[in-house]
Amino acid sequence: MRARLRAAAALAALLPLTACGIQETDVIEAGGGATIDVLPARQVGMILFFLSPDGLLMPSSRSADYEGVDGGQQWPDGTGAAAPSVEETVSALLGGPVPPERSAGMDNDPSLPGPGTRVEVTVSDGRLEVHLAAPLDGLSERAERQLVCTAAYAERAAGSAPVTLRGTDGTRAPARCDLRPDPEPATTGTAPR
């Protein structure tokens, strides 16, 4: 008897919902969130990885002709558009954010070598070796990620190239670009590590 009462009560509760006479309507959009293409085709120029105000990696696309960057190799698509070399892209990162990037809150990790640091890149079997004329000792994990991601995306559109950093004081193990947020909690009032 109780089972019948429960079933009848459940059916009675559903009837008003199904027979209320309200017709189904299509979704009415009120406007989506603002979006920007942060990883556009490399033909536009270069993709640099700066730090956001909360210390997370943040990609920025920069036109190849910004600040007079000259192109290196030719694009294989036959357009003749010059692609900036990996060296030019990493050098642009070390030069720091330009005014529009700075106004968006982007910055370099303080431990990165500064502008004018000599950069040489060797590519062999899809692997990159980034040689910096600066010591790697004292380079934070975030600074390493900036370098690795910038070099990896300069070499391959998917950013999948493994990158080895070499400095005047040694070599780091090969790494791949990891765009996941840092596991380290951000601390307020201090510069990013």
Image: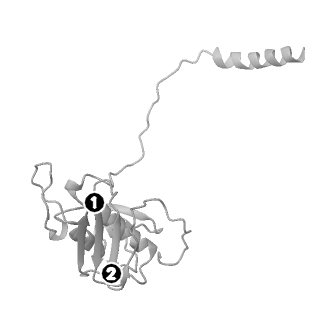
Comparing labels 1 and 2, the label whose residue is closer to the camera? 1
**Secondary structure found at label 1:** loop
Mark 2 lies on residue: 167
Mark nearer the N terminus (1 vs 2): 1
Q: Is residue 152 left or right of residue 16?
A: left
Image coordinates for residue 71, horizontal then vertical, percent: 14, 64
Q: Which residue lies at the image location 30% right of the left edge and 60% below the top edge?
A: 153
Q: How many labels were placed on the picture?
A: 2
Can residue 139 be seen here? The reply is yes
**The one of 15 and 185 positioned closer to us in this rendering:** 185
Can residue 48 be seen here? The reply is no
Residue 126 disc label: 1
Q: Could you tell me how far apart the alpha carbons at marks 1 and 2 are, in whole angstroms?
A: 20 Å
Amino acid marked by disc 2? Gly
**Secondary structure found at label 2:** strand
Q: Is residue 56 left or right of residue 185?
A: left
Q: Quadrant of residue 29?
A: top left
Image coordinates for residue 4, horizontal then vertical, percent: 84, 14
Q: Which residue lies at the image location 14% right of the left edge and 69% below the top edge?
A: 68
Q: Quadrant of residue 113?
A: bottom left
Q: Is residue 153 left or right of residue 76?
A: right
Residue 49 disc label: none
Q: Quadrant of residue 128?
A: bottom left
Image coordinates for residue 15, horizontal then vertical, percent: 70, 15
Q: Are marks 1 and 2 in contact (CB under 8 Å)?
A: no
Neighbourhood count class around disc 1 (C-alpha, 10 Å): few under 14, some 14–19, many 20 upward: few
